[in-house]
Image (cartoon, rainbow, N blue to C red):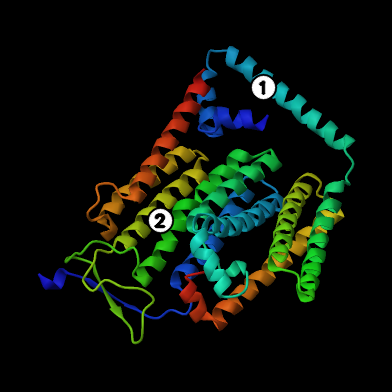
Amino acid sequence: MDSNNLNEDFLFSDLEADESKAEENKGEEINITEELNDSVEQETVSYENESITEEKPDKTNLGLISFCLLIGSFAISGLGGVLSSMGFDSAMYGALEAIQGLMVFASFILMIITRVKYPKDGFGKAVMWLFIVGLIFLAVIIITLIVLCSSCANELHGF
Amino acid sequence: MNFMVFKMVITVHYWHVSPYMVCMIAAFVISYIIIFALLKKHNVEGRIIGLSLLMNIVFIGIGGKLYTFIFSYKCVIPQLYDSNFLNICAIPFSSMGAMFGMLVSIVGFNYINGTDSKLFWKAYALQLPLLYSISKIGCLLMGCCHGIPYEGILKVTYKAADGEVPFAIPEYNVFPVQLCETIAFAIIFAIFLRMYIAKDNYSVEMLCVICAITKGLLEILREEHIGHILNINQIFCLLVMCGAIAVFGFRKVKYFK
C-alpha cells in the first residue's frame, strides 16, 4: 500500500494537494466523490490493519531468535579463543569470526523488525539495550585507542 | 590596493585527532538531532525514529568499512597481517561506502516500518548538504582538497607548524574553495529546511540536482581539476543529476497516467 502512495505523490505535497483541492472544489463534484472514495478506502484499510494487529499476539519468536543469535555469537567467540589456544590454524579462526559477524548482523536486523512490529516483546527490548550499550562501549574503546595510539592511527590513515 | 585584500593564514599542525573526523562526528550529531526534531514534529513515534537512527549508525559503520575492504582488498589485507591481528579498526573508513550504507539503511527501515516512508526519505535527504557543509570545514583546517593558485581577496596561505605534517600542503596562495563549498551547501540546507518546515513541500530529486550542479561547478575551482575537462567527481555529479532527472520524469509520467 505504502509503496504505491510513495510512487504517486512523492513529489507533490499534501499542502499543494490541499490548495489544488480548494481551487477545484468550486464547481466540480467528481473530485469530492473521489476524495470520499479515497477516505472510505483508507478507513477500511486502517480497520483491516487494526483487526490484523488485534489477531496477532504481542509475543513473537523473532525476539527470542535474535537473543539466541547474539548469545550464540558470544559463545562462538569463546569457542574460537579456546580453539586458537589449543593450536588450531588461523583460517578456521577467521571462518568462525565471519560466522560470528553474520550472526550479530542477523540478530541486529531481527531486533529492528521485532522492535518496530512488536514493541512489547521483552527479548527485543533486551537485545536493543545490549546493542546500544555495545555501541557506547565501542565508541569509548575507539576514542581511547585514538588518544593512546594516535601515531598508529595517522600512519594507517584510519578511523 | 593592498588594503582591500584580506588574507587567511592557516597553520597546519601535526594533528593527533584529525579535524576532519571531529567535524564529521559533529556533523552527524547535529544532523541526527535535526532528523529527530523534524520527524517528531510530524508526529512520528520517538521509538521508531530512535530505531531508524540506530540502524543508520550501524549501517554507516558497516558500509564505510566494507567498501574499503571490498575495493582495496589487496592494500588492506597485507597491512592487517603485518600488524598481526585481524582488527576491524585497522581498515580505513570510506565516506562513499558510508553513503551507500546510509541509503541501504533508509530503504531497509522503510521496508520494515511500512509507513511514513515519504517523511523519512525527505528528512534524511535534507541532511546531505549539511553533512557536506560541516565536513568541509575540516578540509579547510587540514589543507586538503584545496583550490587553484589565486592571488586576490580571501586568499589562503598554509603554513606548516613545527615538526612534520601528515601530508603535503600547498606552498603558494590558494583559493578558499572549501569555505565556498561550506557556505554554498549551508545556504542550500537552509533553503530546503525552510521549505520542509514551512510547507513540507520539496522533492528529493530537486535537492539532488541542485547539490550536484553546485558541487560540479565548484569543482572547477579545485586544484585537482587543472588539466581535466571533466573530473571524476564531476562525472559522478552528472550521473547523480541524470539519475535524479530520470526518476523525476518517471514519477511524473506515472502520476499523470
Q: What residue is disc 2 on?
A: B186
Amino acid type, callout 2: Ala
Say few, some or many: other residues with alpha carbon within 10 Å of mark 1 (under 14 / 14 to 19 / 20 or more).
few
Q: Residue at x 76, y 74 (%)?
A: A87
CA gap, disc 1 to disc 2?
Answer: 40 Å
Q: Are marks 1 and 2 on the same chain?
A: no
Say few, some or many: other residues with alpha carbon within 10 Å of mark 2 (under 14 / 14 to 19 / 20 or more).
some
Q: Determine the image quadrant of residue B177.
A: bottom left
How far across and how far down the image is residue A79, in percent? 81, 68
Q: Chain of mark 1?
A: A
Q: What residue is disc 1 on?
A: A38
Q: Is residue B239 left or right of residue B149?
A: right
How far across and how far down the image is residue B95, in percent? 49, 58
Front disc: 1 or 2: 2
Amino acid type, callout 1: Asp
Camera-nearest residue between B154 and B111:
B111
Camera-nearest residue between B33 and B78:
B78
